[in-house]
Amino acid sequence: MSSRWRQIWPPLVAVILFLALWQLSVSWFHVEKWILPAPIDVWHEAVANASSIEGHTLATLRLTMTGFPIGVAVGLAAAVLLHILPGARRALYPLLILSQNVPIIALGPLLVIWFGFGLLPKVILITLVCFFPVAVAGMGGLAQTDRMMLQFMKMAGATRWQIFSKLELPHALPSLFSGIKISAAYAVTGAVVAELIGSGEGLGYYMQLQKSAYRTDRMFIAIILIVLLSLLLFAAVALLEKWLVRWKPQRDA
């Protein structure tokens, strides 16, 4: 049995057992469909409304792929700036932590008041969700540079830029990608929250419509699609990490 298959089959079996238990429970206890639809009902509804759901899914994907790279770029810039300028780090790091204690759902209406119902407030919201894990992981990685190599490069007369580009940044890539993967998991949720606050399309808007109509089956379809989009984005970042950080030793499962 290959190592990849050994990693896949335990969660796959767990998901199949969970769906089977869900299906049997709904049938045995005669649960109303509007309270908890069976997995087969959700599947039939997804097939019947595929064209409508596809449009909302693509809208959420477009919004995510607009905000996520901006959030990663802002987080990376913040990590580099606060690493290079220790004084700025001491002054701004507490503010970064405080910014994460403000509920995103509370900031959304304020952003709509300040910037309207266009794309900008939604992108700002996703950026606020995504930048913090990247910034914290990036600062942690940059601070863990090999001290012996650092002293060696300084004694060899390397410039600050050479130390950063040839030693600190490559050494911080594994930590940095850990933060980007966390941001990838949050990015789709951030886009859905932005659509819930004010939008005419997307899975967040779709969920709001279906909630009003008590279409629980369609709510489940939207939730499953949100999870799938998050997993796809996470997998894409993991593949990029595998390609860029080829020197990193792979751990056996």
Image: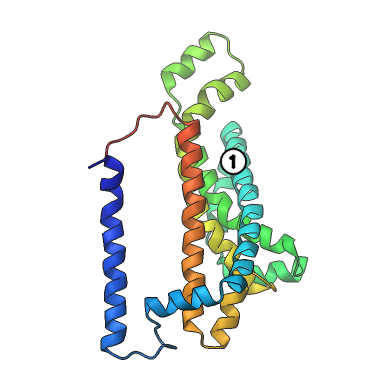
Q: Residue at x 55, y 46 (%)?
A: 93
Q: Residue at x 60, y 67 (%)?
A: 54
Q: Which residue is mark 1?
A: 76
> Where, by quadrant of the figure, is residue 209 drawn?
bottom right
Q: Position of residue 35 (x, y in %)?
A: 41, 87
| Residue 211 horizontal/vertical position (percent) | 54, 83
In the visual, does 87 lie left or right of 229? Answer: right
- At 56% from the left and 53% from the top, the residue drawn is 130
Helix, strand or loop for disc 1: helix
Q: Name the residue nearer the viewer: 203 or 154.
A: 203
Judging depth in this view, the residue of 147 and 162 nearest the camera is 162
Q: Vertical placement of 155 versus 95: above or below? A: above
- Residue 235: percent from the left, percent from the top? 46, 48
Image position, residue 184 (x, y; %): 52, 52
Kind of residue sitting beneath label 1:
Leu
Task: Report the residue at 41% width, 88% height from top.
Answer: 33
Q: Residue furthest left?
A: 1
Using the rendered image of the protein, determine whether residue 141 is visible from the camera's viewpoint. no
